[in-house]
Image (cartoon, helix red, strand yellow):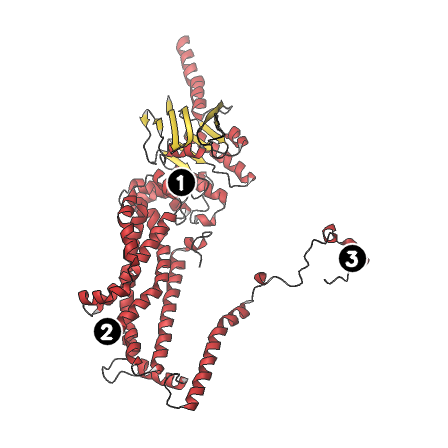
Amino acid sequence: MSLLSFSQVWKEYGEHVVLERLNLTVNAGEFCTIVGASGCGKTTFLRMLLGEEQPSRGHIRLDGHDLPDEPGPDRGVVFQRYSVFPHLTVLKNVMLGLELRGARFTGRLFGAARRAVRDQACEMLDSVGLGQALEKYPSELSGGMQQRLALAQSLIMHPRILLLDEPFGALDPGIRADMHELVLRLWEQSGLTVFMITHDIKEGFHLGTRLLVFDKVRIDAQALHAYGASITYDLPLARTPAGTIEDIRRHVEEEVPRALEAAVN
Amino acid sequence: MVETGTAEASSLRSSGEKGGHWRRTLVKRLINRQPGPILRVSLGMLPFLLLLGLYLAASHARLEANPNDKLLPSFTSFGEAVQRMAIEPSQRSGEILLWADTGASLKRLALGVGISALTGLVFGVLLGSIPYLRANLAPFVAALSMIPPMALLPILFIVFGLGEVSKIVLIVFGITPFIIRDLQQRVRELPVEQIIKAQTLSASSWQLMLRVILPQVLPRLLDAVRLSLGSAWLFLIAAEAIAATEGLGYRIFLLRRYLAMDVILPYVAWITLLAWLTDLALRLISRRAFPWFHTQTGGGGA
C-alpha cells in the first residue's frame, strides 16, 4: 500500500509560487532521488515532508493521515551540514535520540537503561564504520565521517522515512562512492523509504529506485515567480526496492514449493 | 629591479617571466611578516616599559623641584604605602585594609555578576527558544537595557538603603539586560538544522532547551560575562564611591581627599590585575570545560 501521498499540493510565499499541482504516491521501501535546477523547490518539498513548512493548498498524507505539522521521530533527516551536535561526542550524538525518547523530563538515562542504549549506539556506530571514534567530537571528524555519524544518529530512531538533503554534496568523489555503498546497504537492511535531494544526476540514477525531476512547466517571462515548479519526470529505475526482493524470495523459495508440495500430496 | 642573470640563466627562466608580468618582491609585504616569539613578547612589553619610564622621569623631575610633592610619588613611597595597606593591620580597625577592601569588593562583584549570569542564562535561553516569550518580553528587555544604570542608583539607594543590596542590584541591573540579549542572539544563531534534527530525534521543547541549546550556550555565557566584567567593575566602583564603609572603590575615593596618590595608584593597579586575572580564569575554565567549543571551525575562537 502507499505510504505517502501528495494530492494537489501547492506551496506559495505571497505572490511567489514555489511548487504547484504536486501529485505523488510513494510506497514503503522506495528510494526516491530528487534532482532539479536550483530554486525549483526541491528543498521546499523536503521541508514540507519534514513538517517544517506546511503546504499552502492540498494534502500530504502519511499512512492515510495528514502529515503532522512539525518534525517528529517518524521522519529522520540528514542535511548537508550541521546535522550533528558539536557539543556531544560521537557516541553521545547517537545515544541522544534514545535518551530523549526514554527520559521525557531529564533527557538523560542512567544505570542499566543507559548501558542498553549505549550498546545499541555502539552497534549502530560499528555498522557505519565509526566504531573507533566513539569519544571524538564532531569537529575532529572529516566531512564524510560527520555524515556517517548523522546517518547513524537518524537511523537509530528507526524512522519510517529518511530525508537526505544533498548529504554528500560537500564530499570528495572517492568518499562519496563509499557513502553511496553505505546508504544503499543501510536502506536494504532497514527497508526504509528514502527521499534524497542531489545535484548530481548520475548519483540520482545510481542510487534510486525512482527518480523525480523538479522543473517549471510554465514560465512567464514577465513574472518569473507567477508559476511554480512541479514534478516533470517520474522515472522508475532499475534498482528494486528491498522489500520487493524479499517478497519475491519468499514467494519463490517458500510459498511456491509449499504450494507444489501441497499439489503433489 | 636587480637583473644580473647570465645568458644561460635567463634562457632557463620560465616564459612567464619573459612576459614581464612577475612582480619581483624584494621585500615581503608588511601584512605577511610575523614577529618571532621573543620579538613578539618584547614588542608587547614595550608600551608598558615606556609608560613606566615616562612616569619615573616625570616623578623624579617633580620630586626634585619639591620633595613634598604628592602627585607623582616615587616607588619608595609606593612601597611604604603598600606596606601600610597590605601587610600591617590598620591602627583604627585592626584589619589589613587592602585585603578587607578586596574581600568586600570581590564579594559584591561575584554576587552581582553571578546573579546576572544566572538570570541572563535562563532568560536568554527562554527568549531565544520560545517565540511567544520573545514576543512578550524581548521589547521590555530592550527598553530596560536603554536605561542608564547610574541614573537608577539614587532610586536603588532610596529603595534598598545604602547597604550591600543596592550595590549588587546596580551591577545586576547594569549587565543583565546585555547578557540576556547577547545569549538570546546566540541561541538564534544556532543552525536551524540542529533544531530540526533534535525534533526528528523526538525532542520536546523542554528537552531541546535542556540538551541541545543550554549546553551549547554555556561557553557563550562565559564570553558574555567576560565582556560585561568591565561594566560590572565600573558600577561597583561607582556605587562604592558614593556610599560604602569598605571596598576598593570606597578606598580610592576616600583617599582622594588627602591626595594620597601613593595609595590610589597601587589600588588602581591592583584592580586592573584582579580584572585581568578574572578574565584569564574565565578563559581557562571555558577551554577546560568546553573543549568542543574551541576546536569548532569559526566557533568561539579566543
Residue B10, x across and y down, in percent: 78, 56
- What is the distance, in whole Å, between disc 2 and disc 3 at their CAs? 82 Å
Which residue is drawn at the image coordinates 28% and 55% (left, top)? B143
- What is the distance, in whole Å, between disc 3 and disc 1 at their CAs? 62 Å
Task: Give A219 or B92, whichever is nearer the viewer.
Answer: A219
Instruction: Give the labeled residue for mark 1.
Output: A153
> Hey, what amino acid is under mark 2?
Ala
Number of marks drawn: 3
Which part of the image, by quadrant, shows the C terminus of chain B?
A: bottom left
Residue A82, x across and y down, in percent: 43, 44
Which residue is drawn at the image coordinates 38% and 46% (left, top)? A92
Labels 1 & 2 near each other (Cβ < 8 A): no
Instruction: Give the labeled residue for mark 3.
Output: B9
Instruction: Give the labeled residue for mark 2.
Output: B244
Q: Chain of mark 1?
A: A
> Hey, what amino acid is under mark 3?
Ala
Q: Chain of mark 3?
A: B
Respond whether the residues carrying marks 1 and 2 are from the same subunit.
no
